[in-house]
Amino acid sequence: MSNKNAERTYIMVKPDGVQRGLVGDIIGRFEKRGFKLIALKLVHATREHLEDHYGDLKGKPFFPGLINYMASGPVVAMVWEGLDAVKTGRSMLGATNPLASAPGTIRGDYALAVGRNICHGSDSVENAEKEIKLWFPEGIVQYSHDLAPWIFE
Ligand code: IDP
Ligand code: MG
């Protein structure tokens, strides 16, 4: 399998997505698209952990509100693997502001407000690696996926 087929992205259902019962739908979209689930857990993250995760946004006016939102309940942390996983994951999520997200995307189907946009996805391969280490310091389970020849050329 080529490296691009094994690209990994960190996807997270945010507290509003968990409360609204959207976990199964979001997982189902990634499964049905052909991505391989390689890590999954429900976690109520600490503020320190979330400040690390969103470290690049520290100076933004919405940062305190973002941390309050993300610390308000458990999130579902996941790693998905597959062809062009980072870019494809972002396109499945939709635009940061749900009002600008196309119908058919997760945010475009289920959200209206930028501060309640249901899900997170890594924005680059480099950030994906950082986020995977931050959320899964225990490491990731390896298993073979017999579907690969039906999904990748
Ligand atoms: P992304 O989640 O699409 O990568 P980022 O710019 O990395 O977007 O912002 C991280 C998160 O911060 C967004 O998903 C959203 O929840 C929140 N956020 C971004 N911009 C705003 C804003 O202008 N107001 C309130 N929250 C925002
Ligand atoms: Mg981002």
Image (tube, helix red, strand yellow):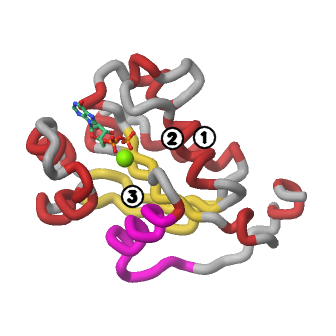
Give the residue displayed 14% in from the left and 48% down from the top. 59
Residue 102, position in %: x, y? 54, 20
- Would you say 117 lies left or right of 83 here? left
Q: What element carries label 3?
A: strand
Q: Which mark is residue 5?
A: none
Tell me the residue that label 1 is attached to.
29
Task: Give the secondary structure at mark 2.
Answer: helix
Q: Residue 26 carries which label?
A: 2
Pick the quarter of the image with the C terminus: bottom right
Total residue callouts: 3
Q: Quadrant of the N terminus?
A: bottom right
| Mark 2 and mark 1 residues within 8 Å of each other at the beta carbon | yes
Question: Could you tell me the amino acid type at mark 3?
Answer: Ala
| CA neighbours of label 1 inside 10 A, class few (<14), some (14 to 19), many (20+) | some
The local crowd at label 3, few if under 14, some if 14 to 19, many if 20 or more residues have their Cα within 10 Å, is: many
Residue 51 picture location, percent across and down: 17, 58
- Apparent side of residue 113 relative to residue 32 in the rendered image (left or right): left
Q: How far apart are marks 2 and 1 (CA)?
A: 5 Å
Is residue 100 visible in the rendered image? The answer is yes
Identify the residue at image location x=55%, y=28%: 105
Q: In this view, does 38 lie to the left or right of 15?
A: right
Residue position for label 3:
77
